[in-house]
Amino acid sequence: MALSDREYRKAFYQALNIQQGRSMSEEDEYERFYVPIYASPNGPAGPDLVAEIINAIDFTTGGSVQLLSGYRGAGKTTELMRLRRKLDPERYVPVYWDVEDYFNTELPIDEGTFLVGLAAGFVDNCEDAGLPQDKLRERLWDFLGRMNVNMEASAGPISAGWGQDGAIHTQVGVGPVALGLRATLRDDESFRAQVRKALESNRAVFRKEIHQFFTDVVADLPGERTPVFIVDSIDHYRGRADTFDQVRESVESLFSVYADELALPGMHVVYTVPIHANPPGWRGQRWPVLNVKVRERDGSDCAEGIELLREVLSRRAPERNLERLLGDQVDRVIRDSGGLFRDLFRLVAGLLLKEGALPVDVVEIESAENRERSNLDVGLSEEHLEILVDVQRTKYLRVPRERSALAWELQARGAMMCYRNGTVNWYGVHPLLEPLVADMNEQS
């Protein structure tokens, strides 16, 4: 029986919003929806970074550290999930951790707390990888004890410290790490102060102990497989308008000052970072995930990029019937997104929530465009717009040093986009902001 318009809208909407009440496994989601947008090395999405990351892992003896950078909504997490699938299961065991489950990404990163979070995040997520969580949890409390850090967790009292007999004495309350340390890392300032003191009082000892923890963890793992620790959502650290600079600087400081601590012994680590983060002196590989190119530098359509995103949407549309919703306006909506999956899905989801017959008419599309344009415009200052005017004119990002933070903020907000163009990337204004930028250009 054919779907009614409402049933079609509902099914399509749910396919665009899998994370809001996941109704299928990650495996099923991948099989049903994934489009190989990186199949062509010189295509509109660029080379296959996952293949290159795996090569870097395979070619490195011992362990490696790599950064995956990109715009929020460009598909980094999807590619990290693909990385988990493509790793050789006979040689590697992937462990995925989302830092946003532990930290407030509107606040600057506290380096010591983040390093403790690495240990807790690995332990909390190792069970999904079939690793011995209980024994690793004991290792975690031993580590905290050696650092003279005590905590009172919501799951029960947990404390560790040196006894008079020179041994470590640990008390652990009932419940998994996630119910205690996760809340403590996020909300307990006294705990963070203890960790900060431990790091600042003797950084060498702190580094030795955190590395000893991971060395012991690797030794506890069954078999001969090497862990690949995937640390996601550091790119979500952007702060609010008044804290953006502090947050950005804290991310760069973490990967510059504490690069040695972040290289965990006996395992490979992949960290996601914001596209605008550029840690001075970072020596490892850094892989950029950019938006899919839907337009050329001269403003004309990039037909290949538009076709890729049409396929992405079609995979999610009931019966792959995208035209039932958008009629002959599919390309227009794809152009509106600028090539960002997040913006594309949000635009289409907004249209699905409207009432009326299908396909939606142009007035409804204009209404959705205006809403998204307003969201992008919120908080933009005159200085922001001046930078966008220059980017629109030159297709380059060149700003005085005193305005560099404003330019980084524009990238974090998605108001400015970077496209691959052969050997040299070029910058553009988000398509929905172009009318505002054009108006300001005329006024100036």
Image (spheres, rainbow, N blue to C red):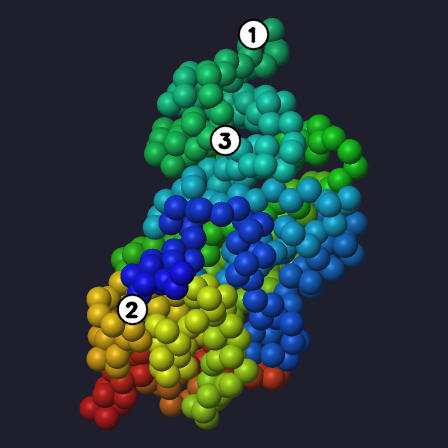
Instruction: Sort mark 3 into few (<14), some (14-19) or many (20+) by Cα contacts within 10 Å.
Output: some
As measured in the structure, the alpha-carbon distance from the residue carrying label 1 to the one carrying label 2 is 67 Å
Residue at point 50% right, 85% down?
302
Query: Which image quarter is the N terminus in?
Result: bottom left
> In the image, is 174 to the left or to the right of 266?
left
Q: Position of residue 314 (x, y in %)?
A: 47, 70
Q: Which quadrant would residue 6 be assigned to in this image?
A: bottom left
Give the farthest residue toward the top: 165
Q: Amino acid at mark 2?
A: Leu
Element type at marker 3?
A: helix
Q: Nearer the viewer, mark 1 or mark 2?
A: 2
Query: Which image quarter is the C terminus in?
Result: bottom left
**Residue, disc 2:** 351
Residue at point 46% right, 85% down?
295
- Is residue 300 visible in the rendered image? The answer is yes
In the image, is residue 33 above or below residue 134?
A: below
**Residue, disc 1:** 164
Q: Nearer the viewer, mark 2 or mark 3?
A: 2
**Residue, disc 3:** 198
**Who comes first in sequence, dot 1 or dot 2?**
1
Residue at point 56% right, 7% down?
164
**Who comes first in sequence, dot 1 or dot 3?**
1
> In the image, is 151 to the left or to the right of 125?
left
